[in-house]
Amino acid sequence: MGTTTPPRTLAEALRARGDESLAGLLRARPDLLSPVPNDITQLATRAGTRASVVRALEHLDRFALQTAEALAVAPDPAPYDTLLALLTGDGQGDGDRRDDAGAAITAALPGALTTLREQALVWGEDTGLHLVRTARELLAPSPQHPSPTGLGPTVAEATAGMSPGRLQEILAAAGLPATHDPVSAVAALAGLFTDRTRMAELLDTAPVEALSVLDRLVWGPPYGEVTPNPAPPVQWLRDRGLLLPVSTRTVVLPREAALHLRAGRAHRVPEPVPPALVAAAERDPQAVDRAAAGQGFMALSTVEDLLKLWNDGGPAILRAGGLSVRELRRTAGSLDASEPVAAFWIELAYAAGLLASDGQTDERYAPTPASDEWLDLPAQDRWTHLATAWLAATRTAGLIGSQDAKGRALSALGPDLDRSAAPEVRRRVLALFASLPPGTAPDPQTVLARLRWERPLRTSGPGGPAAPGGASDLRSRIALWTVDEAELLGITGRGALSSQARALLDEGPDEAAARLAPLIPEPLDHVLLQADLTAVAPGPLERPLAEMLSVLADVESKGGATVYRFTPGSVRRALDAGRAATDLHAFLATHSRTPVPQPLTYLIDDVARRHGHLRIGAASAYVRCDDEAVLNEILADKRSATLRLRRLAPTVLAAQTDPGSLLEGLREMGYAPAAESAEGDVLITRAGARRTPPRTPPVPVPEGPPVPDTTLLTAAVRAVRAGDTAARAVHKDTSETDTAGSLPRTTPAETLATVQAAAMTGSAVWIGYVNAEGAASQRVIAPVKVEGGFVTAYDHTADEVRTYPLHRITGVAELADEQPT
């Protein structure tokens, strides 16, 4: 620009920035891009709106916010030295500790100011720093909300409306000469409070009780209640203007007096340096990776168990959406987990697109077709799929069981679980873990302290502390849930971040899978059969073997080895699935490293011999059996009374219940009936028959506008620059063109060359354009791309990006140079 004149407005300050700096502002505050501003003036206006300023303040760290708070109580504009003094104080007392703190503040202040300038919250040179008006209104003290610094209004603000006679009384009591007008009286009183020597002399004459009152107000809140007849110490302070009336029963300590009592500091404890992370334990990095890999494998096993549990149709969906408490409890019992942990696995499977609603009339949850594809992936790829879904999910499982704003309980898979801050908090927590040396487990409380320093306004808004359960409380809880969930998922091992998780965060899923693969045991193709009707799987099993074994036996215990138990019911389940006894014998002989025990062979043969001896069909329902003695035994059994059986023929019984209930009732009595079709064929029941239609995973709810990419930022900056140039430029011969009603005229070659040059330089041009209806108009456009006979440009006339056919452009005229001011 070639000028040293300081900017007079925020718009001038933004106009003096380079393109890279403007792009940085739009990247940090993407709400300013919706829609793209017409020019710099509109950008500055939008940057000063209340909603945008609040959003920007919420993304400041504690010291940058403290710097803004100090500017809010400083004169406007404030020189750099005044701001520094408000943060460091005047150096009175505390000796070396104050010197160390002052040095840290002095070193950190330039960086904090740079952040505020980049966010367009502060503008101006160091000789005159301006905090944008909206931020000053949010952070400055008022009777409605004290300043975050705990300071009250200035003497001038507190005495506004006070009678001239009362002002003169205060001056006399304070030992100041009388003045001729209220303005000079206020200036004299403020001058007394800011003069360290005279103020010290005044306070030396104060009663001890009066000094105690000041001590209670000095760090805020600065307001206090008084009675109509205040005590002598309070009256002494009121007489000398150290307490000024706000109402008939409320007084306030003026800002200048409070700053003297604080030794010039705006904050009791400035925090220029973020809290350090404290290591809770130092572990072997390889042991951490192994522990995380083991936990990750257990996570895969748990999700597989959940899918298997809901394989033939999961629990019904509540009318309001989600899973009932009873179904969550039942699922938790089946997964051998607590209800909060089971809720996490359910929500994780849902976020990964493995579970969804089936959309039927009797709506239930069931695995999706994508779950079958997921099960076919290698273990390391299955883990990265879950971890990636968890990182991006806004649904927050930790909220399940709590209440919403209307007092309704939040249920698993139900609505209102999205919290847009969750992905950012998760990634930040893991980034703090990653900042420590490998194998180091941080203290979670120090992680919370760092998060609060980085986003203090998520703890307390500009108007004061947040209420319990507010955004800050939620962010802290999300951080603690992240620590627990990362351990469950195998992101961390023994409290430290694993190398595979570091790779996932820094390099992507492929590298993370490559790091994890060597740590996952190879699946086995065998089990160890034992004489007590159990089978021991000494490690993970190949999927076909695991699926068949889960049908033929019940899981008795899990851990490093899984124990399966064979029971009459489990063998009958395999026979119901269409397996013959010979198939089961061959399967066990093939996959057992030990001989098949004789008790297991007898168990299979005995169940197979009785399986299908009874046949159940639909009349309402019937039982048929070639052995009349068996039917006689059933009729004589008192437990069959609820089935309401009667004999239709020597080998047929009819029941007044449905076939399914009849099957379950006879099985509970110890029989092994088989269902049959209307043609008399045995019905085979197979697991995994229910799948939802193709479903997409739930879309995360973004926190505010998305961060723009480089292409959009470049185009937006060029459009803003072009619009600003067009708004302030003078077009040559405008009146003549308007009078003649003619459009710019150039040859097609000249038109193409001019718009290509404008696209390369980012400049704006005037064009004449004739649309398809033959209507002619003039427009100011900033070309972005020229190809295929079309020019794509930001049209400042229409305030949007448009595409124009080159053959409809009558001509191009460059904008006149900006006139000197």
Image (tube, helix red, strand yellow):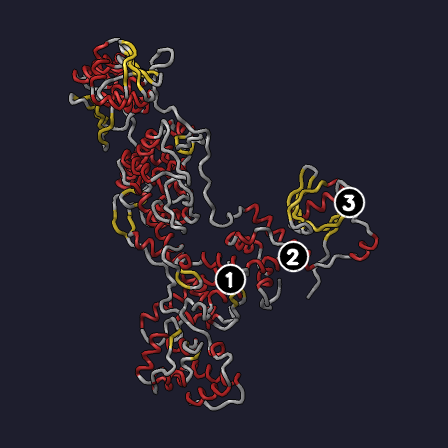
Q: Is residue 22 above or below residue 332?
A: below
Which image quadrant is residue 573 in?
top left
- Which residue was labeled with disc 2? 724
- Which residue was labeled with disc 3? 775
Q: Which residue is more in the foreground, 544 or 97?
A: 544
Q: Residue at x 53, y 53 (%)?
A: 31
Residue 689 place in picture, x, y as percent: 38, 23
* Mark found first going from the N terminus, 3 or 1: 1
Residue 293 place in picture, x, y as percent: 30, 37
Q: Is residue 497 above or below residue 194?
A: above
Q: Secondary structure at mark 1?
A: loop
Disc 3 to disc 1, C-alpha distance: 45 Å
Residue 214 place in picture, x, y as percent: 35, 78
Mark 1 is on which residue type? Leu
Q: Which residue is more in the foreground, 110 or 42?
A: 42
Residue 90 makes an appearance in the image: no
If the image is split into quadrants, where does the N terminus sit?
Answer: bottom right
Q: Is residue 170 above or below residue 589?
A: below
Mark 2 is on which residue type? Asp
Mark 3 is on which residue type? Ala
* Mark found first going from the N terminus, 2 or 3: 2
Whether pointer 3 and pointer 1 mark residues with C-beta atoms closer than 8 Å, the reply is no
Q: Secondary structure at mark 2?
A: helix
Q: Is residue 400 above or below residue 670?
A: below
